[in-house]
Amino acid sequence: MALNKRSRLITHGIARSPNRAMLRAVGFGDGDFDKPIVGVANGHSTMNPCNAGIQPLVDRAMESLKAAGAMPQVFGVPTVTDGIGMGTEGMKYSLVSREVIADAIETSVNGQCMDGVLVVGGCDKNMPAGAIAMARMNVPGIYVYAGTIKPGHWKGQTLTIVSPFEAVGAFAAGKMSQEDYDGIERNACPSVGACGGMYTANTMSSSFEALGISLLGSSQMASPDLEKADSAAESAKVLVEAIRRDIKPRDIITRRSIENAIALVMATGGSTNAVLHYLAIASAADVEWTIDDFERVRRRVPVLCDLKPSGRFVATDFRDAGGVPQVLKMLLAHGLLFGDCLTITGRTIGEELERVPSEPRRDQEVIRPWDNPMYAQGHLAILKGNLAPDGCVAKITGLKNPSITGPARVFDSEPQCMEAIMAKKIRAGDVVVIRYEGPRGGPGMQEMLAPTSALIGQGLGESVGLVTDGRFSGGTWGMVVGHVAPEAQAGGTIALVEEGDPVTIDAHRLLIQLNVDDAELARRRANWKAPPPRYTKGLLAKYTKLVSPANRGAITDGD
């Protein structure tokens, strides 16, 4: 079988002389037109540490592709980072960038008839975007994660990017000195690489090992370390072999492999954003997967890892303790992993795990033994009730009691809420409601790391509930509920909440309830009018018109 069956459309035949002429200008010679053309989607950027270490990985991958008999062609993809955009108007572009990146990859690979694609990305939207694009196009592809940042340190404390967010609340509340506030800021990000806890970037990259589109053991390497570049080179070799064997993303991304990925997310205490992203990936791959499937998996899978944000350890600690392969082998040994799922190597995930021990080493504390988990069940609970009849996502790790009933404190935007928090107007027992921040209303579902971290910094992380039709950073923990659907902009019940209304969050009963009678809600609904869109031109306006509800993944190419 020809390895260039797609690119032959632009490289072979009398009529393709102009095409070849242009390719000769970028390095093709007479012997190169029969080689497979592999696109290298390069997420390198100096805009953020997550992506600033990518270029050396791309360079190694390009060399390896050439050595394996392929012709690599590099193209750039945009990226923005939540850590910098958080709490500003720029944050509205974060989730939107997932669609932009996926569209950019699809445009380059299909527009130039490439035979395969190697995607290299670091910040958290890069991963789902790459998977979405690969699933859409269904050409052989592999994901290379840029790697995690190394942990920072200050006065014996291990730091991540969440540390300065929490310091904002503590400093504002008078609970932190100027010295510590400055010290945390200056030491939180000591290297390139993505945010260091089991936040969204590390959640998605870890789950890609379970899904089968990244090499086993590759996701928790630190970005600056040589092994990360070596892994990029190996990924390139594996991709060329996958092209030779015609292994396509939809051979790998199936209902069973998605369940494997979600089991890994639950076992590691991963980000709420995994719900949103895997709904989108499943849609792109034409796999049946709903928000209720997350709850089904959650009930079966324990949380095995003591990882930040609610635990003690960071990604580099996780790697040293055995990392993703160790957790996957434990899940396999206990019947919670489909071992027959194909991976990009051509081997099954079970075959890839053959040499991994079934139990974690006793000389580490990051990965718990099976009979002593952090929590008996997963941490991402799907709640329903009159406040979210189509579902919402609660992150319940680290909480002594994941239930609260309290008066609603209602805000029609994240900045309004943040002002109230910084002015110390939120009290223990309150349930903060932030609305009109959903996929359409925001638009773009801003992450609420700033308000949740500020509440934690003020000592209110377990005593204040927060409900939003927006979403949360992977670094968020506390009594938080996001992705409320239907959202406020679409007339969901969250739009009808009034200041002081009693609201119940009860993870034990999987319940999210506005305790107001139906007749009163009907009266409020009759008087409600949707506010006009916040944007009428440009990317955000287009996104508003196209985006699906959160319970369907906030995708822009749905029905």
Image (cartoon, grey):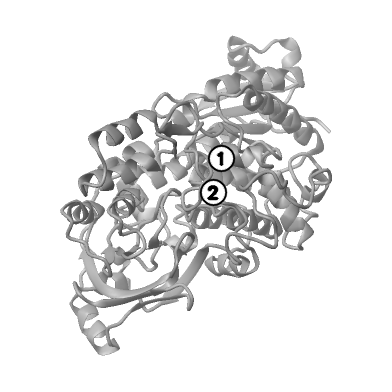
Q: Residue 266 at x, y = what percent?
A: 59, 58
Type of amino acid at the residue the image marks with label 1: Ala
Type of amino acid at the residue the image marks with label 2: Leu
Relative placement, left or right, of 389 versus 245 is left
Number of numbered discs overlaid on the protein picture: 2
| Residue under the image location 73 percent in, 46 percent down | 361
Q: Which part of the image, by quadrant, shows the N terminus? A: top right
Q: Residue 70 at x, y = what percent?
A: 72, 22
Quadrant for residue 485, please give it: bottom left
| Residue under the image location 63 percent in, 45 percent down | 208
Category of crowding for the residue at label 2, using alpha-carbon neighbours closer than 10 angstroms: few (below 14), some (14–19), many (at least 20)? many
Is residue 421 visible to us here? Answer: yes
Q: Name the residue under label 2.
A: 307
Q: In this view, does 120 lie above or below 380?
A: above
Q: In this view, does 493 lie above or below 92?
A: below
- Of pointers 2 and 1, the one earlier in the residue sequence: 2
| Residue under the image location 61 percent in, 33 percent down | 221
Q: Residue 19 at x, y = what percent?
A: 61, 19
In the depicted view, which residue is nearer to us: 410 or 156?
Answer: 156
Relative placement, left or right, of 156 versus 434 is right
Is residue 78 visible to us here? Answer: no
Q: Mark 1 points at which residue?
A: 315
Marks 2 and 1 in Cβ contact (< 8 Å): yes
Q: Is mark 1 on a helix, strand or loop?
A: helix
In the depicted view, which residue is nearer to us: 176 or 142?
Answer: 176
Q: How far apart are marks 2 and 1 (CA)?
A: 8 Å
Relative placement, left or right, of 16 versus 199 is right
Q: Residue 384 at x, y = what percent?
A: 44, 75
